[in-house]
Image (spheres, rainbow, N blue to C red):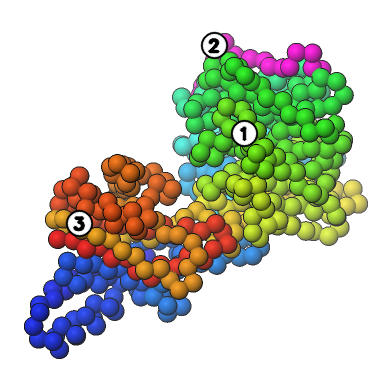
């Protein structure tokens, strides 16, 4: 990205030929100035900052800033096949590092003696394996080791929950002091992990690998010690099985658990809501029974509006079912009047043993991406439901490898709403001759849904701001919204009463709102410089084209 200072042209009401020449020049640059007016036109990328993977500026000679068309299929597919014979690497789940790299966690099985190690892989943002990874970990004396969930903290440290053991690694994969730690003994399974606001590690799971008894929750201090008053246990009275798959810390600091309870022969999906100390809040848990024998909630996320977004399964057996996607209010009401839950119409086999599960995550638009294995031919299928419970344009996406048994373990969304489906392929003859893990990255739609922005690099000097207008492109289908800044670092939007700090693209104003409130910006901040940020907003199927925007000022 390049920058240049815009031209400032004073128009004097004499010499018509001179005036005409100056106006012609003003229309040829990235910024044009006419008296007390500054227009940004997009015939050059100069003086603009933007993500060139998502936005183009005049790439086709059309003088437009517009969203780029994204691939119909995957951006990329990363794979790992271990060179050792009779080996079975399986990636289960991923998380993202502060530098944009991707950590993948699962297990590496040695089929010669049916032992297993935790596997931790690392990939750059383009899906290329980082040298020196994957790395492998085993607890002393333990024959089977497996990673079920992973979280990366702001320092790049990696926390892995899995069979019996919780690992904490530095960004280079070395165990941190005081780690690993036992979860709840040799028969326990840690299925989900979070890092709370104070840096403590909270792990959910079960004390019993045979999935009997109670849901367990344990809090560790960063040094590996157990927090006072933990672990805690939960279950429906009279149930013979209670199991949790995932844990999530919501925007209010509460802990949400997903799983199932089995009182009689059927499994019913369950959600717990706890305070930060692990106490069950009034009115919870919430139990849901579709009428099918096996209903389970697997994974959790929260939309910006507060809704809990849940992915699970509804089926007739413990080994097969249909992908289930639903939403709850923060108060615990399933949003049935809005079309939820949604059960995908194709069934498929789950993997052989708990806590294997399908999963998904909500993005910044409120759409929920999820993945499952579906018939025919047991294909890994990634779906995406919009907030209105309809299937998003361009979905489902199908990952095929003929002649192979396919498994997906998780589906995760990044900050740009890209979707990562994780799992493995195994050659269908059961020989373990070809056993390959994969991470596939899909775009959120035909166009970015992350509302990428175009930012002016050079501020305009003003004493008073008086007006704002925009001109959209001829094929525009989406929206453009704006934020303002006095210094190019602190951004603001008008909330209807005053200018307040903006932390997300949804906190922005339309051109009409900008025009109506722009003068008050100079009133609140005084004279100085003005920078603008324009967000190109699409639902994934809509083209967004911006021709120009103009500020008038004194």
- Who's the residue at 84% across and 44% down the image? 349
Question: Residue 94, can we see it?
Answer: no
As drawn, 27 above or below 400: below
The numbered disc on residue 235 is: none
Q: Nearer the viewer, residue 416 or 133?
A: 416
As drawn, 384 above or below 213: below
Q: Main secondary structure of the magenta part?
A: loop
Find out whether residue 230 is within the magenta segment. yes
Please provide percent x and percent y for residue 434. 81, 53
> Nearer the viewer's eye, disc 1 or disc 2?
1
Closer to the N terminus: mark 1 or mark 2?
2
The magenta segment is 222-240
Task: Identify the residue position indicated by label 1 in the image.
Answer: 328
The numbered disc on residue 228 is: 2
Find out whether residue 511 is within the magenta segment. no
Quarter of the view holding residue 355 = top right
Quarter the N terminus occupies: bottom left
Q: Seen in the image, is 243 located left or right of residue 450?
A: right
How many angstroms separate mark 1 from mark 2 (CA)? Answer: 32 Å
Closer to the N terminus: mark 2 or mark 3?
2
Q: Which secondary structure, mark 2?
A: loop
How many angstroms separate mark 2 from mark 3 (CA)? Answer: 57 Å
Q: How many circles with numbers are drawn on the protein?
A: 3
- Who's the residue at 49% across and 61% down the image? 478
Question: Residue 366, can we see it?
Answer: yes
> Nearer the viewer's eye, disc 2 or disc 3?
3
Quarter the C terminus occupies: bottom left
Task: Identify the residue position indicated by label 3 in the image.
Answer: 465
Q: Which secondary structure, mark 1?
A: strand
């Amino acid at each position: 990205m390049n920058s240049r200072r815009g031209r400032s042209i004073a128009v004097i009401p004499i010499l018509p030929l001179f005036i005409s020449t100056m106006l012609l020049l003003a229309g040829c640059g990235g910024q044009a100035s006419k008296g007390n007016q500054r227009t940004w036109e997009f015939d050059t990328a100069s003086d603009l900052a933007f993500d060139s993977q998502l936005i183009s500026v005049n790439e086709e000679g059309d003088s437009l800033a517009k969203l780029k068309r994204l691939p119909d299929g995957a951006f990329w597919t990363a794979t790992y096949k271990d060179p050792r014979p009779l080996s079975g690497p399986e990636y289960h789940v991923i998380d993202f590092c502060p530098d944009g790299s991707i950590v993948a966690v699962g297990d590496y099985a040695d089929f010669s003696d049916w032992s297993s190690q935790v596997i931790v892989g690392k990939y750059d943002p383009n899906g290329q394996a980082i040298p020196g990874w994957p790395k492998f970990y085993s607890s002393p004396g333990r024959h089977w080791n497996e990673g079920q969930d992973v979280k990366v903290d702001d320092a790049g440290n990696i926390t892995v929950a899995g069979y019996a053991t919780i690992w904490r690694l530095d960004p280079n994969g070395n165990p941190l002091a005081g780690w690993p730690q036992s979860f709840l003994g040799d028969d326990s399974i840690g299925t989900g992990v979070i890092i709370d606001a104070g840096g403590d590690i909270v792990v959910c799971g079960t004390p019993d690998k045979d999935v009997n008894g109670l849901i367990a929750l344990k809090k560790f201090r960063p040094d590996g010690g157990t927090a006072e008053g933990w672990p805690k246990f939960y279950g429906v009275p009279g149930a013979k099985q209670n199991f949790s798959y995932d844990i999530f810390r919501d925007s209010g600091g509460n802990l949400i658990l997903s799983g199932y309870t089995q009182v009689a022969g059927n499994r019913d999906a369950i959600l717990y809501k706890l305070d930060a100390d692990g106490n069950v809040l009034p009115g919870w848990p919430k139990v849901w029974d579709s009428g099918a024998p096996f209903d389970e909630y697997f994974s959790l996320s929260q939309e910006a509006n507060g809704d809990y977004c849940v992915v699970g399964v509804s089926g007739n057996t413990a080994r097969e079912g249909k992908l289930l996607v639903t939403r709850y209010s923060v108060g615990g009401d399933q949003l049935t009047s809005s079309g939820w839950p949604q059960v995908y119409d194709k069934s498929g086999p789950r993997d052989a043993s708990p806590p294997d599960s399908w999963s998904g995550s909500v993005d910044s638009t409120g759409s929920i991406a999820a993945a499952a294995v579906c018939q025919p031919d047991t294909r890994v299928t990634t779906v995406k439901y919009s907030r209105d419970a309809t299937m998003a344009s361009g979905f489902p996406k199908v990952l095929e490898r003929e002649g192979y048994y396919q498994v997906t373990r998780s589906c995760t969304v990044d900050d740009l709403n890209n979707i990562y489906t994780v799992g493995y392929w195994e050659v269908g003859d059961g020989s373990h001759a070809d056993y390959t893990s994969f991470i596939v990255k899909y775009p959120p739609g035909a166009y970015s849904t992350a509302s990428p922005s175009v930012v002016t690099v050079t501020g305009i000097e003003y004493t008073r701001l008086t007006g704002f207008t925009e001109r959209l492109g001829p094929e525009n289908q989406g929206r453009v919204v704006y934020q303002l800044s006095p210094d190019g670092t602190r951004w603001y939007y008008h909330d209807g009463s005053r200018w307040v700090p903006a932390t997300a693209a949804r906190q922005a104003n339309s051109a009409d709102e900008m025009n109506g409130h722009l003068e008050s910006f100079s009133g609140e901040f005084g004279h100085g410089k003005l920078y603008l940020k324009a967000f190109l907003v699409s639902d994934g199927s809509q083209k967004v084209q911006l021709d120009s925007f103009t500020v008038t000022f004194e």
